[in-house]
Image (cartoon, grey):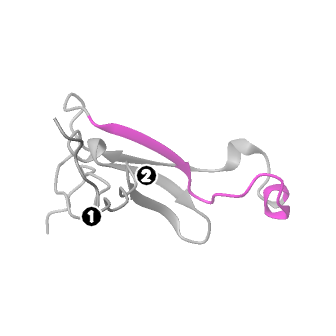
């Protein structure tokens, strides 16, 4: 059995392997993310005890997507730019 020990792009549909010199963007999130000021923050102990998870988007994916933390969902991949609203169909070009 062969294990893939090399990290890959955080985009599930991308198979790019992490290479130190290949570019991209690195993200860090707490594995047990706690909202600031919550009761769970006090239970988690000193900030040094929280583990940090590292996620990487390859050079291509990092131009399209970003990673963010969503409460209740964990780390999610989001488009870098939100969808543009549909254009008006009744627009007219000004006369020349």
> Is 33 one of the magenta-colored residues?
yes
Per the image, label 1 sits on a secondary structure element best described as loop
Quarter occupied by the C terminus: top left
| Label annotation for residue 89 | 1
Mark nearest the camera among 1 and 2 is: 1
As measured in the structure, the alpha-carbon distance from the residue carrying label 1 to the one carrying label 2 is: 34 Å
> Is 86 one of the magenta-colored residues?
no
75 vs 7: above or below: below
Residue at x 31%, y 59% (from the top left corner): 87
The picture quadrant where one finds residue 62 is top left
Contact, CB < 8 Å: mark 1 with mark 2?
no
Residue neighbourhood size for the residue with mark 2, other residues' Cα within 10 Å, grouped as few (<14), some (14–19), many (≥20): many
For label 2, the residue is 67
Quarter occupied by the N terminus: bottom left
53 vs 21: above or below: below
Residue neighbourhood size for the residue with mark 1, other residues' Cα within 10 Å, grouped as few (<14), some (14–19), many (≥20): few
- Mark 1 or mark 2: name the one nearer the start of the chain: 2
Residue at x 20%, y 43% (from the top left corner): 60
The picture quadrant where one finds residue 59 is top left
Per the image, label 2 sits on a secondary structure element best described as strand
- On screen, residue 7 versus residue 29, left or right, reads left
The residue segment tinted magenta is 24-42
Q: Looking at the image, which residue sits at the far front? A: 95
Q: What is the x, y in percent for residue 91?
A: 28, 56
Q: What is the x, y in percent for residue 61?
A: 25, 48
11 vs 17: above or below: below
- On screen, residue 45 versus residue 69, left or right, reads right
Q: What is the x, y in percent for residue 92?
A: 24, 52
Q: What is the x, y in percent for residue 31?
A: 56, 57
Residue at x 27%, y 41% (from the top left corner): 63
- On screen, residue 84 versus residue 72, left or right, reads left
């Amino acid at each position: 059995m062969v294990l893939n020990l090399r990290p890959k792009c955080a985009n599930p549909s991308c198979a790019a392997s992490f290479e130190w010199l290949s570019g991209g963007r690195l993200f860090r999130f707490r594995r047990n993310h706690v909202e600031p000021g919550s009761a769970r923050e006090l239970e988690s102990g000193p900030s040094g005890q929280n583990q940090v998870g590292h996620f990487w988007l390859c050079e291509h994916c990092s131009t399209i997507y970003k990673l963010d933390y969503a409460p209740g969902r964990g780390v999610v991949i989001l488009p870098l730019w939100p969808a543009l609203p549909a254009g008006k169909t009744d627009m007219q070009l000004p006369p020349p």
